[in-house]
Image: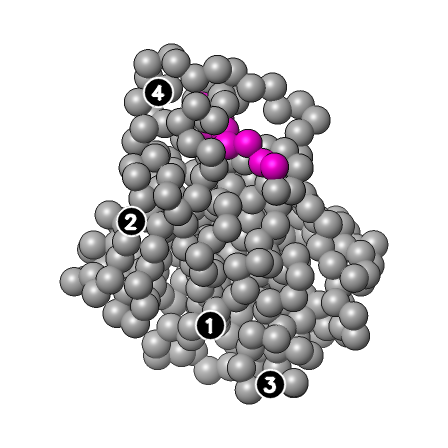
Amino acid sequence: MKLLRLGAPGSERPAVLADDGRTYDLTALTHDIDRPFLAADGVDRVRTALRAGTLPALDPEGLRVGAPVARPGKVVCVGLNYRDHAAETGAPVPERPVVFMKDPGTVVGPYDTVLVPRGSEKTDWEVELAVVIGRRARYLDGPGDAAGVVAGYAVSNDVSERAFQLELSPQWDLGKSCETFNPLGPWLVTADEVPDAQALGLRLSVNGVLRQSGTTKDMIFSVAHIVWYLSQYMVLEPGDIINTGTPAGVALGLPDTPYLRAGDTVELEIDGLGSQRQTFKDA
């Protein structure tokens, strides 16, 4: 299944895109796709309702697509998780996952406008596989337990301001947490529809020019390893999002460093998870 949220910011309606290509309204089951919904086996309840044919159809035409998860408790990111990306940035291949946090308020819809921060000179793009947690996870015994706590996956654009990130602070947060800096979606694709999270192609274009083209098989640390590893240091709650890293091709690593400016358009996609498109404007 593909869970999504439709409507104006703050007034999104939960919905599901079923295998028959039709969209169905979930408001009879839940007020939103969020932590309480996921924690209460919401995915299974939607699946049961679809089989029973009790959900009303919803016409998505003309409705804004919001982020597929409302108000995530936290957004945890893994940096330098592709060897080619580490190489292009001049960083050594990490021996352990490089972990940082991103303000959950950065999460916006997949087609929403992204704001170039005031004073920005180096706003950059990053296509990433996002993992959405579905069950509470603490001190998992090993990577083999990770699948049991993952609700699904989504496309994520981990937008970054490199000067803020690398020049203004020893931590990365300033360059990662600017307003609108995490478009997510269009869907939360449930885990059963992604048989191998390490076999997904990722692509990103800027103004029609292909900049990133990679595959999750080239991750240094797999999704299962990341979920297990994080659970040793923090409690992962339903609705939390993990951005798992980006392949080579970001502006920071390109010879002409073609950073984003107002008017630029970014398009990104991941196999089976849908596509995004954002136009940038000045904040």
**Based on the displayed image, in which of its 4 quarters is residue 157 positioned?**
bottom right
Which residue, given by chain and number where applicable, does mark 2 sit on? 135
Q: Relative to residue 77, is residue 9 depicted above or below?
A: above
Q: Earlier in the sequence, mark 2 or mark 3?
A: 2
**Based on the displayed image, in which of its 4 quarters is residue 233 positioned?**
bottom left
The secondary structure that most of the magenta stretch takes on is strand
Which residue, given by chain and number where applicable, does mark 3 sit on? 169
How far apart are the alpha carbons under marks 2 and 3? 34 Å
How far apart are the alpha carbons under marks 4 and 3? 49 Å
Q: Residue 169: horizontal and vertical position, in percent? A: 60, 85
Q: Is residue 140 visible?
A: yes
How far apart are the alpha carbons under marks 1 and 3? 13 Å
**Tag 4, which secondary structure?**
helix
**Tag 3, which secondary structure?**
loop
On screen, residue 230 versus residue 245, left or right, reads: left
Residue farthest to the left, as pictured: 141
Amino acid type shown at disc 4: Ala
**What numbered label is drawn on residue 39?**
none
